[in-house]
């Protein structure tokens, strides 16, 4: 499916839905559309003799078309959004598959292209919005993934309210997910076990300009119930200096018969999990120095939908969520604008996980090192083109997972259509 076909399909579908409402000026005047282009090359070199393959290497081009209307006039405003996604293979083969850029079937051959089109109806009353259809939530209990070629999505309903000053409330039910490397919408679930839906409710309150408190509860039907509490505090230390504290705590319990089929600790224990993680970040002018820590206790891995847990150790290769994992992270960021090179940034981090338990390993260890160099063109015909160079290394105890070194080259550009 060529890019122009994807754009035409999304445009036609949106226009059909908007036709009865086109007389409303706000609906049309406040509409916007953009297309994001992302070119991604990934090379992953495995180091273990028993690895299923020595190399994963793929190159692909992604197109993401976003269209959002305004709202009709009146007490209840109505609108509609559309999200079209297309991934195209540039170079990949059966013996080099598995980077997460492209799906493959029983033949193990990466597909030539894959796509998905999602529509979202939205209703607004005052500062409260209900969205039904394709969603991309970024919440502690569920987040979409945007770490490869195309972003993932969920399907369901999500209510978001800003009516109370300083308080953001969310409540919703999600039933399906479209993974980052798939065309289909599949039932939501955890670790290969499908669930009928995920219910969630909670919000964030700005206690002061420097302190925000968050609470959420989520229940994946017949699998688990999860509570989250978080605090984020900014402490100004003087001109150009700030200390941010980001503290997160989850308590997850088994809920229903399907939990018995989800991964639990090797002793057969139930899902009964506590997960604390937090990070302190000191900003000094163009530099950031950060240190983070996590403690995961109870039975089994930390459960979450999709691919992205709300964790400080959500990094490039691993998420450090295996049972009993304690982990430290150190991170350094630098913005070269301070040296007269605006648009150029650098990041490096190291995560060390200990006491990892799986069905085959006791008190294992795994570590990861990531380095990013990013440049955004500031002017000229290539203005806003973004180039990211990323290098990662991952090592673990024998039996945990495969060791590898990985390089990525990502070129991105977003163009406003109107």
Image: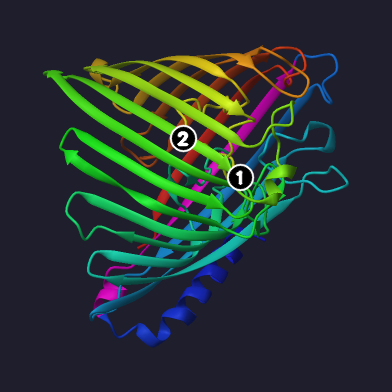
Dot 1: few (<14), some (14–19), or many (≥20) neighbours within 10 Å? many
**Label 1 to label 2: alpha-carbon separation:** 37 Å
Q: Is residue 323 visible?
A: yes
Disc 1 target residue: 61
Give the main secondary structure of the magenta stretch.
strand
Q: Is residue 335 visible?
A: no
Depth check, front residue: 364 or 153? 364
Image x and y of residue 110, in percent: 78, 44
Q: Is residue 43 above or below residue 62?
A: above
Residue at point 58%, 64% (across, down): 117
Q: What's the mark number on residue 250?
A: 2
| Disc 1, SS | strand
Dot 2: few (<14), some (14–19), or many (≥20) neighbours within 10 Å? many
Q: What's drawn in magenta, residue-wise?
A: 25-46
Q: Is residue 56 above or below residue 19?
A: above
Mark found first going from the N terminus, 1 or 2: 1
Mark whose residue sits in front, 1 or 2:
2
Residue at point 34%, 59% (across, down): 160
Residue lying farthest to the left in this orientation: 239
Give the quarter of the image for residue 352: top right
Image x and y of residue 75, in percent: 23, 79
- Quarter of the rendering occupied by the C terminus: bottom left
Image x and y of residue 209, in percent: 15, 37
Depth check, front residue: 218 or 32? 218
Give the quarter of the image for residue 337: top left
| Disc 2, SS | strand
Tell whether 226 sits left or right of 43: left
């Amino acid at each position: 499916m060529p890019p122009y076909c994807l754009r035409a399909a999304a445009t036609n579908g949106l226009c059909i839905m908007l036709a009865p409402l086109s007389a409303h000026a706000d609906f049309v005047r406040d509409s916007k559309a953009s297309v994001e282009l992302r070119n991604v090359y990934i090379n992953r070199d495995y180091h273990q003799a028993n690895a299923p393959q020595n190399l994963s290497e793929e190159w692909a081009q992604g197109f993401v078309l976003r269209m959002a209307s305004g709202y009709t006039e009146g007490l209840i405003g109505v609108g509609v959004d559309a999200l079209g996604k297309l991934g195209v293979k540039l170079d990949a083969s059966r013996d080099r598959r598995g980077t997460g850029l492209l799906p493959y079937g029983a033949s193990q051959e990466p597909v030539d292209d894959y796509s998905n089109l999602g529509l979202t109806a939205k209703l607004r009353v005052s500062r409260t919005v209900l969205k039904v259809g394709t969603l991309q939530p970024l919440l502690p209990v569920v987040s979409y993934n945007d770490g490869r070629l195309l972003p993932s999505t969920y399907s369901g309903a999500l209510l978001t309210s800003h009516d109370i000053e300083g308080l953001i409330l969310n409540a919703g039910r999600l039933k399906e997910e479209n993974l980052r490397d798939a065309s289909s919408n599949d039932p939501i679930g955890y670790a290969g076990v499908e669930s009928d839906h995920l219910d969630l409710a909670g919000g964030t309150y700005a206690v002061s300009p420097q302190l925000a408190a968050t609470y959420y509860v989520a229940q994946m039907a017949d699998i688990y119930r999860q509570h989250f509490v978080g605090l984020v505090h900014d402490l100004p230390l003087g001109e150009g200096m700030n200390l941010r504290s980001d503290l997160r705590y989850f308590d997850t319990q088994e809920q229903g018969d399907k939990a018995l089929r989800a991964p639990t600790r090797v002793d057969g224990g139930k899902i009964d999990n506590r997960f604390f993680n937090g990070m302190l970040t000191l900003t000094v002018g163009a530099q950031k120095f950060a240190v983070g820590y996590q403690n995961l206790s109870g039975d089994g891995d930390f459960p979450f939908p999709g691919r992205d847990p709300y964790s400080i150790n959500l990094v490039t290769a691993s998420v450090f969520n295996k049972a009993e994992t304690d982990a430290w992270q150190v991170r350094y960021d630098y913005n070269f604008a301070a040296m007269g090179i605006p648009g150029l940034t650098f990041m490096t981090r190291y995560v060390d996980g200990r006491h990892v338990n799986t069905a085959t390993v006791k008190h294992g260890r795994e570590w990861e090192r990531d380095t990013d160099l990013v440049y955004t063109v500031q002017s000229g015909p290539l203005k806003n083109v973004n180039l990211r160079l990323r290098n990662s290394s991952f090592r673990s105890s024998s039996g945990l997972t495969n060791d590898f070194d990985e390089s990525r080259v990502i070129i991105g550009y977003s163009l406003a259509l109107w």
